[in-house]
Amino acid sequence: MIKIAVIGVGRWGVHLLRNFLAHPQVSVVAVLDPHAERLTAVKQQFNLDENVLLTTQWSALQEISDLAAVAIATPATTHYHLIKDALQQGYHVLAEKPLTLDPKESEELCYLAELQKLILMVDHTYLFHPAVTAGKAVVEANKLGELRYGYASRTHLGPVRQDVDALWDLAIHDIAIFNNWLGQVPVKVQATGTVWLQTAENSPSDLADLVWVTLTYPNNFQAYIHLCWLNPDKQRRLAVVGSLGSLIFDEMSPNALLTLLHGEFERQGNLFIPVNQSREVIELNPGEPLQQVCDRFIQSIIQDQPPLVSSGWVGTNLVKILAALTTSLTQGGKPVFLTDI
């Protein structure tokens, strides 16, 4: 049994706790949260055993013998110091995304994990979604033909964050999926944004409510992402377009989460005639993505094999991309190369 402590039991942390409590190879021995009322709530919600330590103090974990791992679901601003201390204490770490808010800090943590021979994994839950897994298989099977471009839209009405803008709040999911499906990371990025709600006049800093992102990959594939948290037209849609069709992941279509639209052009003189058009709903394997995340973390520890899909290095690349996009955003959409970050 892998002894684990869950750090932070807010909105997302309770789901991590639920999954680890249900895992047959895990013993949850501690829950830590700075808010004592949250500890009381999860004790009642999950009927936690009296032997599970409930604490508001990080130092209390050091008293637990054979503690092997921690799952961290705290605000991103706390990640660097918590993860660094956990690795130095000899704990494997599963961290909520983003890994940190600084690319250099993320790199440092990855090197530290390697030095300590510990697993550092980031909870990029979408990478374990059955639709994303199946979509990657479709792309790799060349069913789309020559890949041409991609687009995504992630909009809703709130919640409006006061610590980060819409870019840092929303973009990481779609960037992670594009990177996963393409098997590449961008070489150049651009971002423009608009601030309506939290301007410099009424907020410590301008936080963009609307952001448009362009990602350019090594093969010149470009992906365009629309992000907004003040649009009641809720969208969770991502697509990759190729010469033989389009692959669409649409979370707002529960009966057709992943769809392959076949279609191409046949040239007749100066005309382009659509041919071979059909719609195929891709069958998906059942399963909760977060359960897959938690299990992959535990199996990585048992097998002593870093997780390739959502390793610390995968998380670091995403932080680098977000940092580059932030630089572009502050410079009015100027292209930024990842080699400069």
Image (cartoon, helix red, strand yellow):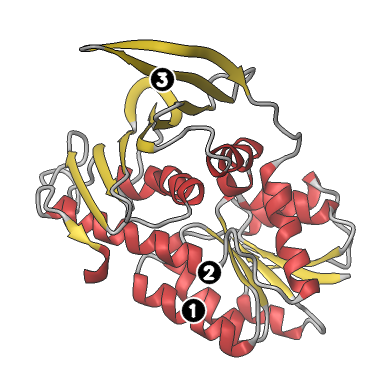
Number of the front mark, 2 or 1: 2
Q: Residue at x 36, y 17 (%)?
A: 265
Q: Is residue 153 above or below residue 327?
A: above
C-alpha distance separating marks 2 and 1: 8 Å
Q: Is residue 89 above or below residue 335?
A: below
Give the amino acid at mark 1: Leu
Position of 276 with respect to 156 (left or right) is right
Tell which circle, 1 or 3, labels the residue nearer the N-terminal end: 1
Residue 117's spot in the image, x, y percent?
65, 85
Disc 3 and disc 2 in contact, CB within 8 angstroms = no
Which quarter of the picture shows residue 210?
Answer: top left
Give the amino acid at mark 3: Glu
Disc sitting over residue 109 in the figure: 1
Which quarter of the picture shows residue 76?
Answer: bottom left
Residue where numbered disc 2 is placed: 312
Disc 2 and disc 1 in contact, CB within 8 angstroms = yes
Residue where numbered disc 3 is placed: 264
Q: Nearer the viewer, residue 143 or 233?
A: 143
Residue 189 visible in the shown view: yes
Where does the N terminus fall, quadrant-wise? bottom right
Tell which circle, 3 or 2, labels the residue nearer the N-terminal end: 3
Number of the front mark, 3 or 2: 3
Disc sitting over residue 253 in the figure: none
Tell which circle, 2 or 1, labels the residue nearer the N-terminal end: 1
Q: Disc 1 on helix, strand or loop? A: helix
Q: Residue at x 32, y 44 (%)?
A: 221
Residue 178's spot in the image, x, y percent?
44, 45
Q: Is residue 197 above or below residue 7?
A: above
Q: Disc 2 on helix, strand or loop? A: helix
Position of 210 with respect to 314 (left or right) is left
Where does the C terminus fall, quadrant-wise? bottom left
Q: Disc 3 on helix, strand or loop? A: strand
